[in-house]
Amino acid sequence: MTSSEFDFDTRQIHAGTRPDAEFGARLPPVYQTAGFVFDSFDDGEGRFNGTVAGPAYSRTDNPTNAAVARRLADLEGGAGGLLTSSGTAAIAATLNSLAVAGDHVLATDSLYEGTRTLFSNSFGRQGVEIELLPADAPLEVWQRAIRPTTKALFTETIPNPKNDVVDLERLAGIARAGGFPLIVDNTVATPYLNRPIEHGADLVIHSTSKWLSGHGAVIGGVVIDAGTFDWDSQASRFPNIASPSTRGVASFTERFGRLAFLTYLRSVTALDYGPTLPATSAFMLLQGIETLSLRMDRHVSNSLALAQWLEHRDEVTSVSYPGLVTDPSYARAQKYLPQGSGAVVTFELAGGREASRAFIDSLQLISKMTHLGDVRTLAIHTGSTIHGHLTEAERLERGITQGTIRLSIGLESVRDLRADLERALGAAAAVAGSGSGALAGAGSAAGSGAPSDAASTDAASLDAASTETDDAEAA
Ligand SMILES: *Cc1c(COP(=O)(O)O)cnc(C)c1O
């Protein structure tokens, strides 16, 4: 079935699969196997050199994974896709296919913290410089940053956790003029709320661990190739894709056309590094994808209702959710996210770290954990966890304070979620109202830029508190 004939709701259930040839199984069989038997000498040779259709080894060829990748590529409007062992692996494999030591990559500066760490730690160590710029920096700033060695522009549709929606079409224009692909991490939007390829993206990435799987059970990732980037016009920038090999083998573009990048990603990068998703995980991911639109509608309506409610609470100084009329990203969300602004609601609690501690420790229904896109609602104090390794100055640069709480809104009843939040906000207010001396002390330690001893004591007691809570929950 092809993408254009059917609506999204139909394609999320049918695209990319057909009843299995052997028994007519309606769902794609879980090919939980390392390898595939060859019929003969010639069959083995053919499967290896690509002249015979058929998988050889599950590191890159698993048929269950291939079926799920076809479904996701269809939903994003791409030419094809490759599943990976995590969203992080999808990003790493994509950039490893484009950039080598000495190269340069541009990225917007509001990003998932794990991606920032990957860029500065591992890519930095490999000698790939990833330069972060504010998405809305003036055009001249972007243009001046482009070098002959620039190999990609990387961004997130709805950046995690700040929700400062990017102008995809502007970024696509910058990448196109520069001669390199725009890579969009579309995890938070999902293909139901935004399809970056329709706005000029060349490659789309997801952490499928989040809303695509949707039930918090499996880690995974995917890379989808739009099939539209003109690698041949940039052959000197991307010789690994658009030039013949040193042994005289024709280029990937000559052999695979619009699937050139995807084929390179699968047959070179994934083959060499092995970021393979288990077939059982691919199957569970597929179960999630089949209800994506239904779940997202509910994630979105719950998120909007709770964001609007939080906005009017005295304990809360600001709420970031692009679906709110008061949000700086509202106008952009109307253009890029007409069906809803996702399900991450980030807010600022009055009273800083101690109020945040009381808030988190008072939650009963909402899970205290890192992760996104679960059917369950999750809450995290990012300053002591995801952003805990940063200095106060670095946190503030990212817009993270000691009062920042990130919620991933699930599918429970809004009434029950509101009751849990109300109890926790009450506990936060009690701390914020009573301990003004302690709060002033914490504030000045943070402000001095040298919180070392005080902060580590606080961190130790926070760990102890959360361990106690976990034990209580387990019991
Ligand atoms: C979680 C996340 C990732 C990383 O995905 P994993 O599957 O956890 O490796 C990448 N990008 C965004 C926006 C995320 O939220």
Image (cartoon, rainbow, N blue to C red):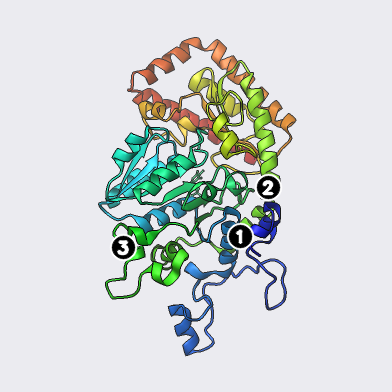
Q: Quadrant of the C terminus?
A: top right
Q: Residue at x 42, y 67 (%)?
A: 271
Circle 3: element type: helix
Tell us which disc is closer to us: 3 or 1. 3
Q: Is residue 69 left or right of residue 459?
A: right
Distance between the alpha carbons at the discs numbered 3 and 1: 30 Å
Return the x and y of residue 99 as percentages of the image width and height. Answer: 33, 54
Which residue does the image show at 41% across and 52% down from the upper left? 181
- From the image, tell me which residue sits under label 1: 71
Furthest residue in direction bottom, as rendered? 41
Q: Can residue 120 be seen in this view?
A: yes
Q: Which circle's residue, 2 or 1, is located before the other in the chain?
A: 1
Relative image position of residue 18 (x, y in whole percent) = 68, 69
Q: Where is residue 241 in the image (x, y as percent from the top left)?
A: 36, 64
Q: Is residue 184 above or below residue 281?
A: above
Residue type of the residue flagged with mark 3 = Pro
Residue at the spot of label 3: 239
- In the foreground, 204 or 171: 171
Question: In what element is the residue under mark 1?
Answer: helix
Marks 3 and 1, the one that precedes in the sequence: 1
Q: Do the residues labelled 2 and 1 touch (CB within 8 Å)?
A: no
Q: Considering depth in this image, is 219 or 258 the residue closer to the camera? A: 258
Label 3 neighbour load within 10 Å: few <14, some 14-19, many 20+: some
Q: Does the residue labelled 3 lie within 8 Å of ligand 1?
A: no
Where on the picture, by quarter, is residue 450?
Answer: top left
Q: Mark 2 points at which residue?
A: 293
Is residue 365 visible in this depiction of the protein? no
Disc 2/disc 1 C-alpha distance (Å): 14 Å
Of the residues under marks 2 and 3, which one precedes in the sequence? Answer: 3
**Extreme residue in the left direction:** 102
Which corner quadrant holds the N terminus? bottom right
Residue type for callout 1: Arg
